[in-house]
């Protein structure tokens, strides 16, 4: 596959406007009439870019950044600034236009040699402008090369020198787009070439769109460091968060002032709800006067709008209709009592053990062909474990009369009408489930399974309800996971905590939002061997930044993966193109500590070594290949949301898949607009 298919899809956004009008014309240098505007269609490339108007004509706006391409003929030193509206790919210009060659396998193989260390004919590069009118210091211009290009420092210097001679609109900085290019960039100091990486650009941006859309609601500015558990949100609030939180109740829109991973639970929740969600760094200051007012909020890839709603918009808001895909609740089997190993559980057993356990069992049973490395019958890497079926929870709450308390709570009108009463009742219910002793014979049966199958290893005790990992409702982060459980007493407490978490306030609020009946929700439990994680994270089998085909989005953090989904800090963010084996670095993790398993049980913090990347090109390819195989198991799922763990032992890396579920994107709010006459 042609590596030129990887265009500069950088996830950078800036202000709502660009620095120059995109409709501007250019001045003709070769026409008989001096300074006569040249028709846009008359020139598909320029030998130089001396003014903003020329740049505007050649460049293309994408996600708030303006980009174009350049080509340098290494034999003649001629440079071509390419019209990106006409030529989508470098190959379109070089092969089709300059060389006028048919796209045979031989010709394209020869063309692709221009991405190797020794350039046979061309240097192929990109120019990108990140405009920022409100903060001129962040107004950046960069030149770069495809992340798979093994370009040398000498050729980077040659390109920079040629650009200096012909591109005078602004000073350019070199932007490495891969780990290999970052290493090459370290050798550019003698050439006095300023280097800026994607991580610096990402962190310096004042705005980042996570989920586009529109909403009208009440702006609710949450004070810094507020305890999210003490805050009550209305479902039509536009929540402005000044601290990173692991979760949030259903709202109409989200604004954060701190960057986090797009795959955090809050951002995944916004995607599932179909609500606008963005980071706007100065929002708490710039929009303080709108607090508690009805506002219009719109998120676009290249900018946002936040203002007081007009009377007409407020009226429309009151008649808004939310279109959501109906969540189909699966049937449940409350009679199964077998504690089955994952290797004996299939996707059809979701009715007994929940979707999470069933999906992992299905992957463990699958033997996937190794199409990349060659060979067949290779199993996916799934940590061993066993499922505790729904029936054990039902037996527990019935034995202690908790089922009648649940029925009474749900039938009380206060449950739906009084937020404070609902919150208190749920807390009391969770306490009742956790404080009630587990039947001794049941606990003995579970402990024996743990001791014999898993050799009493430290385990993660995980939720696997019938109301998560479903099409249209993934339930990410709603229920509890207890890490690194190492003794029988802790195992009992962990199981009951996971059962009780089905009544977490955030879980109840989320199910209310999707119309899921609470009395139809049952928790099963997954007991799974804990992996001594060097790193962990989330992978989506799609490109959520630039929508490139066959490109995966990967987030990673050192240590256990809880902080990736909680969004406490910026994760390392990688795009991996399966077609080109191209690894694009979006950001590096800014974590100074990581969570690791405590030998005594639970987790502890450990200092992280600075500067070392989590996902090298080799690791990104290995993980993406594993995820690609997993996607073959779930052929009817368009995009998979996969949680993974990296184990490093004796210098050898092993990636483990610990969850796979459908990636949920909901339909947005639809406003009943007035008819135009």
Image: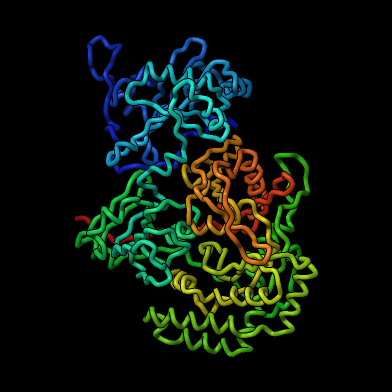
Near-viewer residue (264 or 331): 264
Near-viewer residue (338 or 502): 502
Image point (32%, 36%), residue name: 137
665 sits left or right of 524 in the view: left
Q: Quadrant of residue 433?
A: bottom right
Percent across and percent down for residue 588 are 51, 44
Image coloring type: rainbow
User: Can residue 103 be spotted in the picture?
Assistant: no
Considering only vertical position in the picture, is 121 above or below 128?
above
Near-viewer residue (131 or 372): 131
Location of the N terminus by quadrant is top right
Image point (25%, 20%), residue name: 37
Percent across and percent down for residue 20 are 28, 32
User: Can residue 403 be spotted in the picture?
Assistant: yes
65 sits left or right of 182 in the view: left
Considering only vertical position in the picture, is 99 above or below 150?
above
Considering only vertical position in the picture, is 211 above or below 163?
below
Image point (30%, 32%), residue name: 22
Percent across and percent down for residue 672 are 29, 62
Considering only vertical position in the picture, is 281 above or below 114?
below
Percent across and percent down for residue 217 are 30, 63
477 sits left or right of 47 in the view: right
Image point (64%, 58%), residue name: 658
């Amino acid at each position: 596959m042609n590596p030129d298919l990887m265009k500069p899809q950088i996830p950078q956004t800036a202000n709502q406007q660009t620095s120059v009008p995109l409709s501007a014309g250019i001045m003709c240098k070769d026409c008989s009439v001096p300074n006569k505007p040249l028709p846009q269609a008359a020139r598909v490339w320029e030998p130089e870019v001396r003014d903003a108007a020329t740049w505007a004509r050649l460049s293309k706006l994408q996600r708030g950044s303006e980009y174009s391409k350049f080509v340098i003929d290494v034999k003649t030193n001629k440079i071509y600034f390419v019209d990106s509206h006409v030529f989508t790919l470098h190959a379109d210009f070089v092969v089709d236009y300059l060389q006028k060659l048919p796209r045979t396998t031989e010709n394209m193989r020869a063309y692709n040699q221009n991405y190797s260390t020794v350039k046979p004919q061309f240097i192929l590069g990109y120019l990108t402008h990140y405009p920022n009118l409100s903060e001129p210091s962040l107004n950046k211009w960069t030149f770069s090369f495809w992340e798979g290009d093994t370009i040398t420092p000498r050729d980077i210097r040659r390109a920079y020198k040629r650009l200096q001679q012909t591109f005078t609109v602004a000073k350019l900085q070199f932007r490495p787009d891969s780990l290999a290019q970052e290493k090459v960039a370290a050798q550019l100091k003698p050439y006095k070439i300023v280097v800026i990486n994607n991580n610096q650009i990402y962190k310096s941006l004042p705005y980042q769109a996570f989920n586009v859309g529109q909403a009208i609601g009440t702006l609710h500015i949450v004070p810094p460091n507020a305890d999210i558990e003490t805050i009550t949100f209305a479902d039509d609030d536009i929540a402005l968060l000044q601290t990173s939180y692991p979760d949030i109740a259903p709202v109409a829109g989200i604004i954060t002032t701190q960057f986090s991973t797009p795959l955090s639970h809050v951002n995944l929740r916004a995607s599932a709800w179909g609500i606008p969600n963005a980071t706007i760094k100065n929002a708490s200051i710039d929009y303080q006067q709108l607090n508690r007012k009805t506002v219009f909020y719109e998120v676009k890839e290249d900018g946002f709008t936040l203002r007081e709603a007009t009377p007409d918009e407020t009226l429309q808001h009151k008649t808004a209709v939310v279109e959501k895909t109906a969540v189909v609740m699966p049937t449940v089997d409350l009679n199964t009592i077998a504690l089955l190993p994952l290797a004996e559980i299939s996707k059809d057993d979701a009715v007994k053990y929940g979707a999470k356990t069933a999906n992992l069992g299905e992957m463990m049973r699958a033997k996937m062909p190794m199409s990349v490395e060659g060979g067949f019958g290779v199993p996916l890497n799934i940590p061993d474990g066993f499922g505790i079926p729904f029936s054990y929870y039902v037996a527990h709450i019935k034995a202690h009369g908790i089922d009648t308390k649940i029925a009474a709570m749900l039938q009380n009108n206060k449950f739906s009408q009084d937020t404070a009463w609902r919150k208190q009742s749920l807390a009391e219910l969770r306490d009742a489930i956790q404080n009630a002793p587990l039947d001794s014979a049941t606990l003995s049966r579970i402990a024996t399974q743990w001791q014999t199958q898993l050799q009493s290893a430290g385990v993660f005790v995980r939720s696997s309800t019938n109301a998560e990992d479903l099409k249209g409702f993934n339930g990410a982060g709603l229920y509890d996971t207890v890490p690194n459980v190492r003794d029988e007493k802790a195992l009992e407490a962990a199981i009951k905590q996971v059962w009780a978490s089905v009544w977490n306030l955030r879980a109840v609020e989320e199910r209310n939002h999707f119309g899921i009946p609470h009395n139809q929700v049952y928790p099963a439990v997954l007991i799974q061997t804990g992996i001594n994680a060097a790193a962990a994270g989330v992978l989506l089998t799609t490109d959520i930044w630039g929508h490139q085909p066959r490109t995966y989005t990967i987030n990673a953090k050192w240590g256990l993966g809880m902080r990736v989904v909680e969004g406490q800090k910026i994760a390392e963010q990688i795009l991996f193109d399966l077609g080109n084996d191209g690894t694009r670095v979006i950001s590096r993790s800014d974590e100074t500590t990581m969570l690791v398993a405590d030998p005594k049980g639970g987790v502890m913090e450990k200092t992280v070594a600075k500067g070392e990347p989590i996902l090298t090109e080799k690791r990104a390819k290995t993980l993406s290949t594993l995820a690609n195989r997993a996607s073959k198991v779930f052929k009817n799922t368009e995009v998979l949301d996969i949680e993974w763990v990296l184990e490093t032992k004796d210098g050898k890396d092993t990636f483990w898949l610990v969850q796979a579920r459908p990636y949920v994107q909901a339909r947005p709010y639809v406003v009943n607009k007035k008819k135009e006459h």
